[in-house]
Amino acid sequence: MAANVELLDPARILPNRDNPRLIFRLQELEELEESIASQGILVPLSVYADGKNRYVLLDGERRWRCARKLGLHTVPAIIQPKPERVQNIMMMFAIHNARRDWDPLPTALKLQELERELTKIRGRKLTESELAASASLSRGAVRRYRKILRIPADLQRTLLKDLEDPGKEQSISVDQVIEAVDAADSLRKAQVLDDDGVEELIYAIVEKFRRKVIRSTVEPRKLGAIGRAVRNGDLTVAQVKGIIRRFVARLTMTISDVVTRTIEDIEKRKSIERGFKAFEEKFLPTLEENRELIPQFRVRVNLLIKRLRALL
């Protein structure tokens, strides 16, 4: 074993409170536990000293958990210098940033904490690029995590509770809640919903995901088209408010039902308008310029007039 690796009592090692990975799934731990039981810990843990005979993890919490469960008396570990608080958070992101098994919500919460600490130190709000560099993340990842933080606090708690129960199938995913938040925000921007209405719509969409009334994660994006239609003047705020109220109140009403009563009606109206425009700008002038052809179309024109009168 290399000179910089020491054997430490796992009981003297503590988890790192700044680890963005908060959730450890039972199945993954059991598989790792079997490997450690047969082969031992092949990759040393990384820790720093925090007082006399006490250490804090930088890397290897799953290995440490398994070692404790197996009753191992020692684990191999590399002892690093103790970092400052902000440096500790940044190191945790840097050490783990290549791993894809992090749950996005806990990571977003820890990124928020890092941003707060850096804001205090620098005396100003960080730019997206600065935060991305500090957390060893891409700007796209930072945008996604910031979007996750827009999820209402009690829904965040529900998502975390689902994650903490490894034997339970998740009733709702972070991506589904993000889509619900985006959909509600699009209607807020169109001045269809106030803050209370936004919250009601988010919860309605989430509940319909749970009940499988909405099955596609991206289906709430269709509500964004309704918001755009309001901003373009194709729908009135009053029209959409009424439909959204019914959508929230009726658990079986789907987003497709909403779209049918709004966007599809707009498309039908526009199609009719295009037909009238084509008749007025193309076919009618052609007949006026070629009056000798009128007798050939007299019967059809009279039938058309008769049908239009019946409609009116």
Image (tube, rainbow, N blue to C red):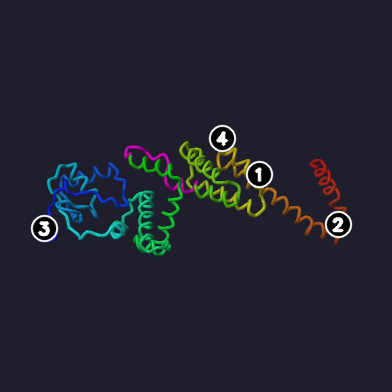
Image location (x, y in percent) of residue 11: 16, 46
> Does the CB distance between marks 3 and 1 fall below 8 Å?
no
> Does the CB distance between marks 2 and 1 fall below 8 Å?
no
User: Is residue 74 located in the magenta-colored stretch of the structure?
Assistant: no
Decide if residue 43 is in sight here. no
Q: Amino acid at mark 4?
A: Arg
Residue with the mark numbered 1: 239
Q: Nearer the viewer, mark 3 or mark 1?
A: 1
Residue with the mark numbered 3: 1
When the figure is inspected, residue 40 is found, relative to residue 286, above or below; the finding is above
SS class, disc 2: helix
Q: Amino acid at mark 2?
A: Leu
Q: Nearer the viewer, mark 4 or mark 2?
A: 4
User: Is residue 173 located in the magenta-colored stretch of the structure?
Assistant: yes
Image location (x, y in percent) of residue 297: 84, 52
Lower sequence index among marks 4 and 2: 4
What span is in magenta? 165-180
Lower sequence index among marks 2 and 1: 1
Lower sequence index among marks 3 and 1: 3
Q: Residue at x 68, y 48 (%)?
A: 268
Q: Amino acid at mark 1?
A: Gln
In this picture, residue 149 sits left or right of residue 199: left
Q: Residue at x 26, y 51 (%)?
A: 16
SS class, disc 3: loop
Residue with the mark numbered 4: 250
SS class, disc 4: loop
In this picture, residue 307 sits left or right of residue 262: right
Classify mark 4: residues with Cα within 10 Å, few (<14), some (14-19) or many (20+): few
On residue 293, the disc is 2
